[in-house]
Amino acid sequence: MTAPAVLSVDLDALARNYRTLERLTGVPVTPVVKADGYGLGAAAVARRLMLEGARTFFIARLSEGVLLRQAVGPEPVIYVLDGCHGEGAPAALRAADLRPVLNQPTQITAWLDSGGGPSALQIDTGMNRIGVRPEDAPEPFAGLELVMSHLACADEPDQPMNRRQRDLFAQATQRYPGVTRSFANSGGCFLGPDFAFDQVRPGICLYGSGPTGRPDDRIAPVATLLVDILQVRDVLAGESVGYSRGFVADRPMQVATCAAGYADGILRRYSPDGQVWVGGEMRPMLGRVSMDVIAVDVTGLDVTAGDQVEVFGPNRLLDDAAAAAGTISYELLTSVMPRVPRRYL
Ligand SMILES: *Cc1c(COP(=O)(O)O)cnc(C)c1O
């Protein structure tokens, strides 16, 4: 059975991006595969990255870690960014051989009191989201394998906060000699060699987005959202298309109704600036995005039911599609709903 909308994932392109980041930084790449591998499918993504040499992964939730462990087997190290959070967390973490990224003294105590084991420590160097402040960083404790921090503005290379965070991290980690340091996310991989530390921790660039939220020649597109045209219809001048007369034709047009809407992850915010690649060119979406369909202007194109439009992919780059929807690539990818099957190339 074929589906009318498919998210196709180019695992070779993913592997190329992994190698690019490895070359660029000169240190091991430890991929972030949270949110089901940014929507692409954490199991398939992680298995392919293991073939490229990845041995450590990061996910956000304990539940994601449990699924990932089943997918990748016993070898790789898996860190849980939420840390040791919630009732029963220590036992659940241990049962799936997951390592918490401990982010506050109560988590450290909970983990150590329950028997401890390999773990990481998050130091907050300015994002004020999660982690201990540098001045509150604890003494080294048993099982501490990794110390990490996260950049707030890595997609803005000129933002002075990047260097301030980097310097704070370098200073704070002096307290933990011999413990592996992990600092740079995707954007951080492009900020220069002194941002790399011992390992880098990218997500989005692996999945085909540029480091500053704009397309970048060094990063290959990975995900392509292809949607079938269900019907091509003639619309007369003065007629409207879709809910609320969101678009009114000022001339006779051909309009393609395509089989994906907001319940598939085509954000409603695409209107009024959404575009898709169809019939060899870029064409505007028309009117409101519905739950199950979008309308596209295909006037003068030689397309018919069963042909496809590309919402994002190699012809309509992810970062450009995100900008048109007033958002970022991360949200576009993680919005693609479960009813859109993932196909791996
Ligand atoms: C999501 C996340 C990353 C990956 O960020 P990208 O911008 O996708 O590279 C790295 N570290 C932490 C702590 C994160 O939450």
Image (cartoon, helix red, strand yellow):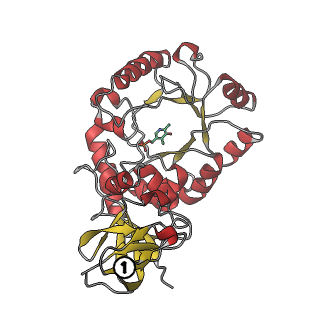
Label 1, ligand 1: CB separation under 8 Å: no
Q: Residue at x 47, y 76 (%)?
A: 259
* Residue 100 vs residue 185, the one in the foreground: 185
Judge whether 165 appears above or below 18 on screen: above
Residue 256 percent location from the top left of the image: 38, 79
Relative image position of residue 282 (x, y in whole percent): 27, 67
Q: Which residue occupies the foreground of this view, 269 or 178?
A: 269
The type of residue carrying mark 1 is: Val
Number of marks in picture: 1
User: Which quadrant is home to the C terminus?
Assistant: bottom left
Lateral position of residue 246 relative to residue 318, left or right: right
The percent position of residue 33, horizontal first and vertical second, equals 49, 50
In this orientation, does residue 212 appear?
yes
Compare residues 302 and 199 and report the one nearer the observer: 302
Residue 48 appears in which quarter of the rendering?
Answer: bottom left
Give x and y (percent) for residue 179. Answer: 48, 26
- Compared across the picture, whether 321 is left or right of 75 comes to left
- Who's the residue at 64% across and 46% down the image? 62
Q: Which SS class for mark 1?
A: strand
Q: Residue at x 66, y 22 (%)?
A: 105
Pick the front one: 264 or 270: 270
Q: Farthest residue in the right direction?
A: 87
- Is residue 27 visible from the viewing direction of this image? no
> Would you call the spot at circle 1 few (<14 residues within 10 Å), some (14-19), or many (20 or more)?
many
- Name the residue beneath numbered marker 1: 255
